[in-house]
Amino acid sequence: MDMRQLKYFLTIAREGQITRAAKLLNMEQPPLSRQLKLMEEELGVKLFDRHGKGLKLTDAGELLKQKAEQLFIQFNETLQEVKETEEGVRGVLSIGSVVSCISLLPKRIERFRVRFPRVTFKILEGDHFYLGEQLEKRAIDLVVARLPFEALTDPKQFAVLPLPSDPFVVVIPSSWEQYSGKHAIRMIELAQFPFIALKSDQTTRMHEQVVSECKRHGFEPNIVCECSSVAIIMSLIAEGIGATVFPKSVMSSFPSTVVKMLNIEDADFQSGVGILWLKDHYLPKSARFFIDSFEVE
């Protein structure tokens, strides 16, 4: 069995039908059916069960699919590594980021592009679970996220470069006149605010950190809304619906005319930040240099 046959098999497995797979491969159906039969005869196992017009992988077929996908990833990574030996730093650098860390990227990308103009960027936004899956699939090279990284996959497979911690601040509507001219607030004052929480069904660690700090000061926040979108929360605050507690770096992405940031006088709790990538796997030169740009600061 060669790589060409494995490509045929993977296309059939993904499409679940020989007719569609043949069309994608730009070949006729009978030759593709013969190739599948040859593969099954060579391996001595049945790779698919037929259900009407569709195909379903057998246990043996599922195992071959997993191994073949890994093999193609390694093959493509090897080709890329060989190309980079001659071509230098170029290509597409794919970065995943949680919304609350997006503000850490623009200036860094700008400086990086000056140094490596042949590198282009692809930015993917999502929560920890989604970004962990994409990193594991090699759909992205790096992730910038809050720590600890709440992924469903094995955390030991990720290398982590911790970045400087990000202090929490209180964000309130600019229309709250009683805080006009003020630059700081005490934690207990949050007890009187309608509170908007940054939280999703899957990622809760930062929310729990904020609630824990509130409890340490003798109250539980009066949560009137939970939302997984930083932008939506900012819109709600701008309309005067409530306040929140965010990492300070988030504020650089939003105008201070619609919301107001207040430092916290009597608490110094921080949000961890880090850049993550897969251990023991090929990492493009562009990704390695991008990581280095974090380490030198």
Image (cartoon, rainbow, N blue to C red):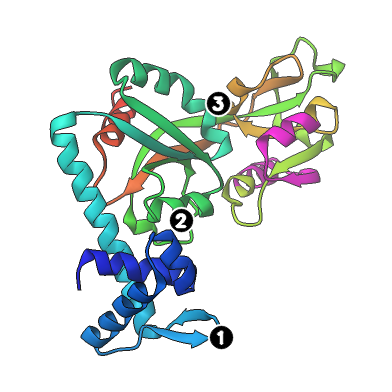
Q: Secondary structure beneath disc 1?
A: loop
Q: Quadrant of the C terminus?
A: top left
Occupied quadrant, residue 172: top right
For disc 1, the marked residue is: 52
Occupied quadrant, residue 73: bottom left
Q: Earlier in the sequence, mark 2 or mark 1?
A: 1
Residue type at mark 2: give it: Glu
Q: Nearer the viewer, residue 191 or 119?
A: 119
Picture residue at 48% right of the left edge, 49% below the top:
131
| Residue 119 x %, y % | 33, 27
| Residue 214 x %, y % | 69, 42
Q: Earlier in the sequence, mark 3 or mark 1?
A: 1
| Residue 216 x %, y % | 66, 44
Q: Nearer the viewer, residue 185 or 99?
A: 99
Is residue 281 among the parts visible in the rendering? no
* Start-end of magenta stretch: 209-236
Residue type at mark 1: give it: Gly
For disc 2, the marked residue is: 133
Q: Residues within 10 Å of mark 1 (few under 14, many from 20)?
A: few
